[in-house]
């Protein structure tokens, strides 16, 4: 057996939050929890004890109530802390001192520092202004906004009054915004006048004017002057400047005490195969899930500085904001991670003394392709944890991090989704990191891998499922009164079992490997192949920047078609095709070898950076992609229409 890439020191294990929590569980319940597996098993076999202990451990502000869980045998249908009352924003605004709560940097070089006291008062002013506009619990506040401090203020002000927050990034097209916000009918829209990306200034207000034409529910439009000093408000229904809306009035926030399951966020599915699903998440479940993931799985402590590269349109944005509940400082960045050079985020990690550095698997791969060596060019002395998500982290990317970024660091590959506002599998700061594996299944998450017959398997690939309820299960979908769409999305394959849609394997170390989306799984000759199995091999080849693979139906069978984006100036030759095929054949199997390899200029991807295998598969089969507005580069899809090289 090969050695792990990293093992925490005894001192680090002893100081970890998860170690302290395990000792408290042992003392409270008289059980033995000497290692992660025993604590994990306790969290599944004694869910009431586990979640009660965790509420107390994290000092959740609110009233717990008598019951921890009701109807635990129902999935969906279980209710956690059904008697509890709390306010999400109150739990995130625990600190009111003069230490920074937010450190912000923009691509254009500007930055701000906002203290905990300043954030607390700003949230109070925003919440008060919402109340004056008639916003009450259950109303929706939407935001079309860059990742700036005002977004955090508005989200927490919304939560303070019990309204529901929903946001998208400003690079969305008009129809993409309407497809999302039009369904939830917000009363208030928060926006900035524009944003900076890749060295350019982009206007937002022209889009907002068009959006408002299609969403009559908006009564007030709040504008943050981010790229200019005096944006024009004409054509903006109820238009008001941020300073005029939230710059006066009572500053001490009042926190509405609400049920544990009161709606907090509306997040959206990618929407590449139809109108996005509006996924409603509750305040209590989101709070507990994020606290658990932050404190136990990422070892975030009071005073830490937490960074995640994200936009307001990705679920990792609310995940990042929740770090305030652990009394950490948020480090926000808005702009391109590669402008003016690829070290921008590592520069930020040094200048802001980041302790947790979060990014995507694609960023790590791109840094490797660009031959960056942060271990040589940067200190990174404060960074204890590097987190990666968005797509499976290739084994070679694990190597890159430990060889060229930082040797002594906890590399936490994490996986979950917008569907649960959190993770099914993540890191263990008190355990070893094995090459190519997500370390552990999340505490309280009964994650299994099912074979085609619906039986749990290990060391075999299959469907990732969750067999027991957990607090951050969605409350449901918006405008789905009978729950039919919600049930069809997750429970239509296995009765009473959440089917997440990932193709995965439980390893000998009790970790997890994700091989891609199960609905994008390749099936040549009846053999299931995860798309990540091919990506991991192809993208090791220096000439290949990135790739996308789909299955193309031919009669009663399927063949594999691989699309590759090459380094600038390179052309796909027969020799390079053979090199790619040989690499795949020698490191996987002959079944994995593509029947066709085609060069493309761009790989289509969503706004959050995920490649869209399903959309490409639809196009090459002559079917229409219903919602191109979900894509960051919809023009890239046009390449795949009527390609003669895809036809025998």
Image (cartoon, rainbow, N blue to C red):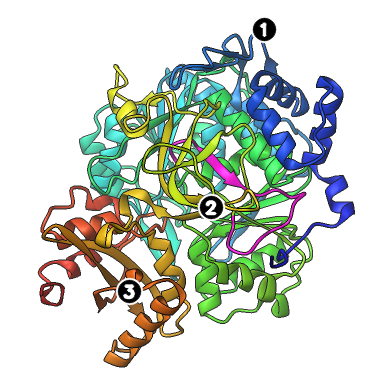
Residue 399 is covered by the magenta coloring: no
Q: Is residue 235 visible?
A: no
Residue position marked by numbered label 1 in the rendering? 66
Residue position marked by numbered label 3 in the rendering? 593
Residue 480, given in percent of the width and then of the height, sits at 29, 22
Element under disc 1:
loop
Residue position marked by numbered label 2 in the rendering? 459
Name the dominant secondary structure of the magenta segment: loop
Select label 2 or label 3 by which is in front: 2
Q: CA distance from mark 2 to mark 3?
A: 23 Å
The reply to whether dot 3 and dot 1 touch (C-beta < 8 Å) is: no
Q: Residue at x 54, y 41 (%)?
A: 424
Q: Quadrant of the image for the N terminus?
A: bottom right
Q: Quadrant of residue 419?
A: top left
Residue 130, given in percent of the width and then of the height, sits at 48, 24
Residue 432 is covered by the magenta coloring: yes
Q: Earlier in the sequence, mark 3 or mark 1?
A: 1
Q: Residue at x 15, y 72 (%)?
A: 646
Left or right, residue 591 beside residue 55 = left
Element under disc 3:
loop
Between residues 583 and 140, which one lies in front from this camera angle? 583
Element under disc 2:
loop
Number of residues whose C-alpha sits closer than 10 Å to that of mark 2, classed few (under 14), some (14–19) or many (20 or more): some
Q: Quadrant of residue 596?
A: bottom left
Which of the numbered marks, if any, corresponds to residue 43? none
- Say how many tags the image has: 3
Q: Residue at x 52, y 80 (%)?
A: 370
Select label 3 or label 1 by which is in front: 3
Residue 15, given in percent of the width and then of the height, sits at 86, 46
Look at the image and give the residue range highlighted in magenta.
418-437
């Amino acid at each position: 057996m090969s050695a792990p890439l990293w093992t925490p020191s005894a001192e680090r294990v002893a100081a970890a939050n998860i170690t302290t929590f395990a000792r408290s569980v042992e003392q409270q319940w008289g059980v033995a929890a000497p290692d992660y597996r025993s604590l994990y098993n306790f969290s599944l076999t004694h869910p009431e004890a586990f979640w009660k202990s965790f509420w107390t451990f994290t000092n959740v502000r609110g009233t717990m109530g008598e019951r921890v869980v009701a109807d635990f045998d129902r999935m969906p249908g279980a209710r956690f802390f059904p008697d509890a009352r709390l306010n999400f924003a109150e739990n995130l605004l625990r600190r009111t001192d003069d230490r920074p709560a937010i450190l912000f940097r923009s691509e254009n070089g500007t930055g701000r520092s906002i203290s905990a006291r300043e954030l607390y008062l700003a949230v109070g002013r925003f919440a008060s202004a919402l109340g004056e506009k008639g916003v009450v619990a259950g109303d929706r506040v939407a935001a079309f906004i860059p990742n700036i401090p005002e977004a955090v203020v508005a989200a927490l002000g919304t939560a303070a009054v019990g309204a529901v927050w929903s946001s998208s990034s400003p690079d969305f097209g008009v129809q993409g915004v309407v497809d999302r916000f039009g369904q939830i009918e917000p009363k208030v829209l928060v926006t900035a006048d524009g944003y900076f990306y890749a060295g350019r200034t982009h206007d937002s207000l022209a889009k907002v004017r068009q959006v408002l034409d299609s969403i009559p529910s908006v009564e007030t439009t709040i504008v943050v002057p981010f790229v200019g000093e005096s944006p024009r408000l004409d054509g903006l229904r109820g238009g008001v400047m941020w300073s005029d809306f939230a710059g006066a009035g009572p500053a001490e926030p009042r926190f509405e005490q609400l049920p544990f399951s009161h709606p907090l966020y509306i997040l959206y599915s990618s929407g590449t195969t139809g109108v996005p699903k509006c996924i409603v998440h509750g305040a209590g479940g989101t709070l507990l899930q994020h606290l658990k993931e932050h404190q136990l799985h990422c070892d975030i402590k009071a005073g830490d500085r937490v960074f995640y590269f994200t936009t307001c349109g990705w679920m990792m944005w609310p995940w990042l904001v929740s770090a305030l509940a652990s009394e950490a400082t948020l480090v926000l960045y808005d702009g391109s991670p590669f402008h003016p050079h690829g070290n921008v985020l590592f520069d930020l990690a040094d200048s802001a003394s980041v302790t947790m550095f979060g990014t995507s698997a694609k960023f790590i791969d791109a840094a490797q392709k660009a031959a960056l060596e942060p271990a040589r060019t940067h200190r990174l002395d404060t960074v204890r944890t590097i987190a990666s998500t968005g797509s499976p982290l290739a084994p070679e990317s694990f190597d890159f991090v430990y060889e060229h970024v930082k040797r002594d660091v906890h590399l936490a590959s994490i996986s979950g989704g917008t569907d649960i506002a959190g993770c099914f599998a993540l890191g263990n700061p008190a355990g070893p990191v094995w090459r190519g594996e997500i370390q552990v299944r999340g505490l309280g998450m009964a994650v299994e891998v099912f074979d085609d017959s619906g039986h749990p398997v290990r060391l075999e690939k299959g469907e990732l499922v969750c067999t027991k309820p957990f607090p951050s299960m969605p409350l449901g979908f918006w405008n789905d009164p009978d729950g039919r769409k919600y049930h069809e999305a997750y429970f239509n394959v296995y009765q009473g079992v959440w089917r997440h849609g990932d193709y995965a394997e439980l390893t000998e170390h009790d970790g997890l490997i994700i091989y891609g989306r199960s609905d994008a799984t390749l099936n040549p000759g009846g053999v299931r192949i995860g798309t990540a199995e091919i990506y991991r091999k192809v993208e090791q080849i220096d000439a290949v920047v990135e790739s996308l693979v789909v299955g193309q139906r031919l009669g009663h069978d399927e063949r594999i078609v691989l699309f590759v984006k090459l380094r600038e100036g390179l052309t796909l030759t027969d020799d390079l095709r053979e090199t790619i095929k040989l690499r795949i054949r020698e490191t996987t199997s002959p079944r994995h070898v593509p029947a066709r390899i085609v060069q493309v200029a761009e790989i289509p991807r969503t706004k959050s950076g995920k490649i869209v295998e399903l959309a490409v598969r639809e196009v090459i089969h002559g079917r229409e992609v219903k919602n191109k507005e979900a894509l960051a580069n919809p023009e890239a899809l046009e390449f795949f229409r009527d390609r003669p090289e895809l036809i025998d």
